[in-house]
Image (cartoon, rainbow, N blue to C red):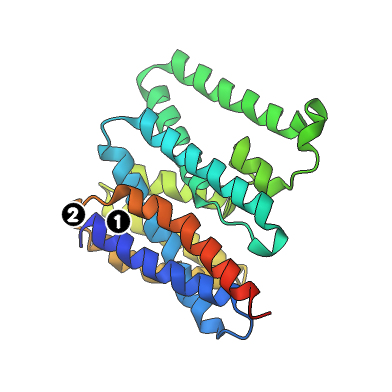
Amino acid sequence: MTTFQLKALALLLMVIDHIGYYFDGAPDLLRLIGRLSFPLFLFCMVQGWRHTRNRKKYLLRLYGMSLVMSGIMHFAGAGYGNHNIFITMFWVGVLISAAELFQKDFRQGCMAYGLIAVSQILFQSVRNLIPALSSLSGDILCGILPSPLSCEYGIPYVLLGIAMYFLWDNRAGFCAAYLMAALLEFCNNDPQCLIVLALPLMLRWNGEKGPGCKWFFYLFYPAHTLALFLLSSRFR
């Protein structure tokens, strides 16, 4: 399977998941099916991160889309939910680059980790420093001032993305890390453990990108969540 095919499948699964999220009375099966979506998007992101020619632009796109999602969440209200996988992927990219920098240059790597630590200190205190932000929810604020601890799916999936990147050339290690993540979800009695079903699809990736359509996938995410939210509101 190409990257495009994996993304298209992840997109379909995501729509199914969000139909289950927004429409009262929808079968629980829809949400269960949707558990496969984010891991596939995450896998495609780390492979894209490996091959992109400009990581700075990649990060700016992710952050820009994160701001879009924060804006939608703010104006749509609580019923819209927390939908911002962009900031989770943003942190995966940042921490992968920091780890690679640390491997190449110890001093610069330490500086990068130091800057990340400072940014998180600022995140924790920003509501006191800027009173205008005190009214924003944590989910919205995280999309503006990113924190790997508060992003959608949380730090476990940031770490999973990093593991996907560094272990891909070692398939046994890749599978072990992924299965461990699924097992932890299972031990927590979380249906997110169904991410295990996405692993065979990742292993079928042939290394080919396929058709581009980059902005389609970026823009479809906010467009479809907002459309489903507005549509479901009419049936309540």
Foreground: 58 or 109? 58
Is residue 186 in view? no
Query: Residue 83: x, y in percent?
Result: 57, 56
Query: Would you say residue 109 is visible in this rendering?
Result: yes
- To which quarter of the image does residue 145 belong? top right
Residue 32 point in image, percent of width and height: 50, 76
Q: Secondary structure at mark 2?
A: loop
Q: From this viewpoint, which residue is outermost toward the top? A: 107
Please tell me which of labels 2 and 1 falls first in the chain: 1
Name the residue located 58 percent from the left edge and 21 percent from the top edge. 114
Residue 149: mark in rendering: none
In the shown orientation, is residue 8 left or right of residue 61? left
Q: 141 and 180: which one is in front?
A: 141
Residue at the spot x=42%, y=59% of the render? Answer: 39
Mark 2 and mark 1: Cα distance apart in space: 26 Å
Residue at (38% x, 70% y) in the render: 12
Q: Quadrant of the N terminus?
A: bottom left
Residue matched to label 1: 172
Q: Residue at x 58, y 53 (%)?
A: 152
Q: Amino acid at mark 2?
A: Gly
- Badge 1 marks a residue whose secondary structure is helix
Q: Nearer the viewer, mark 2 or mark 1?
A: 2
Circle 2 packing at 10 Å, graded few (<14), some (14-19), many (20+), is few
Q: Amino acid at mark 1?
A: Ala
